[in-house]
Image (tube, helix red, strand yellow):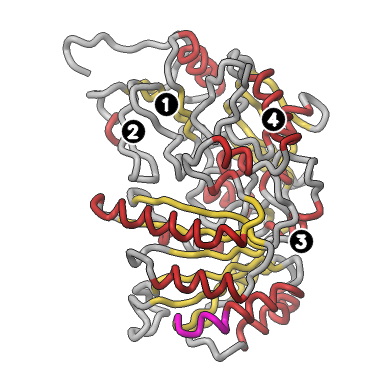
Amino acid sequence: MTETQAPVAIEGFRGALLAPGDDGYEQSRFTWNAMFDRRPALIARCSGVADVIAGVNYARDNGMLLSVRGGGHSIPGHSTCDDGLVLDLSPMRSVRVDPVKKTVRAEGGVNWGTYDHETGAFGLASPGGQVSTTGIAGLTLGGGIGWLMRKHGLACDNLISADVVTAAGELVTASADENEELFWGLRGGGGNFGVVTSFEFELHEVGMVLGGAVMYPVDRAPEVLAHYREFCKTAPEALTTYALLVTAPPAPFVPPEMVGHPVVVVAGCYAGDLSEGERAVQPLREYGNPPIDLFQPLPYPVLQSMFDETGPAGHSYYIKGDYVSDVSDELIETVIEQAAAMPGPHCEIHFGQMGGAIARVGENDTACSYRNAQFALIAIAHWIEPHDEEGHIAWARGLGEAVRPHTVGTYVNFLGDEGDERVKYAYGTEEKYDRLVALKRKWDPNNLFCLNQNIKPGA
């Protein structure tokens, strides 16, 4: 802070307050996605619920733009802002496991790596994402796609209750028995209704899993993806799989002749009896004699962190994604054409297998929509140098347009800043979206929580 600036104070706030020029400000203003180089007027690093309440009250009373940061993994950059207040929950990382009741209470700044470390000590887990660095808050509030979803549902399907600081600065609890409509909206409605300071989840017995991947040269992609499609039709619910088009990394398990070249990968996680898992994944491991086979028994937290290096903090990311009903021959051809046009070695295309426990939750039981989608398709543009931004974004958008005829819906956590119509599209029906608008009007009538996939309160 310069000599002419007075220290900023927020009444009732005990955590660290950082303004431009303060020690620690530069480090704290950066988020996982380096595409967004923003300078908040103030970063409030919360030590607990009282700080969250104080920060919300300060932003509301002073008409400040408010950004809420949990894990900071926001693809559209919503966890930071220019000239506003960033309410940073990252110091709030308590995780309390009840191994008898098989429940866990975790604060809003926890990421899945910390969460899984604590629950894994008891051989327990609940569905998280695909990497351990993602925050539990953003993933859960948007729905929660990940390795355990076909057996145990989405992250939001395992939410028991949530403590929420509202736009009025009040702490409320949402569950099936208390503020039920708010609880419905939190499971898929994103950060529209308040700041979730803690989450209570159901836990499941998940110790060792059978996880890993097989890899082939990209010229075999048509046959491998067609085989993957047929395999998914009868795959057991304990198995969640992904098919990926990527560039082979320089890793000890990759033959030198494949490093730096496009490859097709089928990855999976079987959460159940390992001998049954071996039989379940055998058709994937046997097909076409894959040059690389990494499937092996692993502790679930190890699998959850296996792909962390594909998305390091400090790089830039832009994604386009939707749900599709089938991996048709036409879609395979389109995706392979788009993969050949990848502008850089870090870009990826994913097919994620849905179904199972996800589809057993009613379409209107939570705000999260498109429960019957069979696959999620996502293009990840990932670059390091700022001058590569334009070409990478153009590629991802081009893929999104190319596959649009095959799509049947979209997922809130896939969205960038794409406009109101795409946000509405993420909720499936006009009736469901109207229900969310009514909920927004009740809990945040002035749209204080607007840096999200925003559901506007309307008149």
Q: Which residue is mark 1?
A: 86
Q: Are marks 3 and 4 in contact (CB under 8 Å)?
A: no
Are dots 2 and 3 in contact, CB under 8 Å? Answer: no
Mark 2 lies on a secondary structure that is: helix
- The magenta span reads 218-224
Instruction: Indicate yes or no whether the magenta region holds residue 367.
Output: no
Provide the residue designation for mark 3. 356
Badge 3 element? helix
Determine the secondary structure under disc 4.
Answer: helix
Give the mark nearest the N terminus, 3 or 4. Answer: 3
Mark with earlier residue (3, 1): 1
Whichever of callouts 2 and 4 sits on the residue coming sooner in the sequence is 2
Q: Position of residue 441 (x, y in %)?
A: 66, 19
Residue type of the residue flagged with mark 2: Arg
**Residue, x 34% and y 38% (percent of image)?**
30
Mark 1 in CB contact with mark 2 (< 8 angstroms): yes
Mark 4 and 1 residues: CB-CB less than 8 Å, in contact?
Answer: no
Q: Quadrant of the N terminus?
A: top left
Q: Earlier in the sequence, mark 4 or mark 1?
A: 1
Q: How many marks?
A: 4
Q: Earlier in the sequence, mark 2 or mark 3?
A: 2
Query: Which of the two labelled residues, at mark 1 and mark 2, occupies the earlier sequence position?
Result: 2
Residue type at the position of mark 3: Gly
Q: How many angstroms separate mark 3 from mark 4 (CA)?
A: 26 Å
* Residue that label 4 marks: 436
Determine which residue is flagged by label 2: 29
Q: Please name whichever residue, 158 or 190, is drawn nearer the observer in this view of the structure.
A: 190
Residue 345 in view: yes
* Residue reaching furthest to the bottom: 289
Q: Residue 74, percent across and down?
A: 47, 42
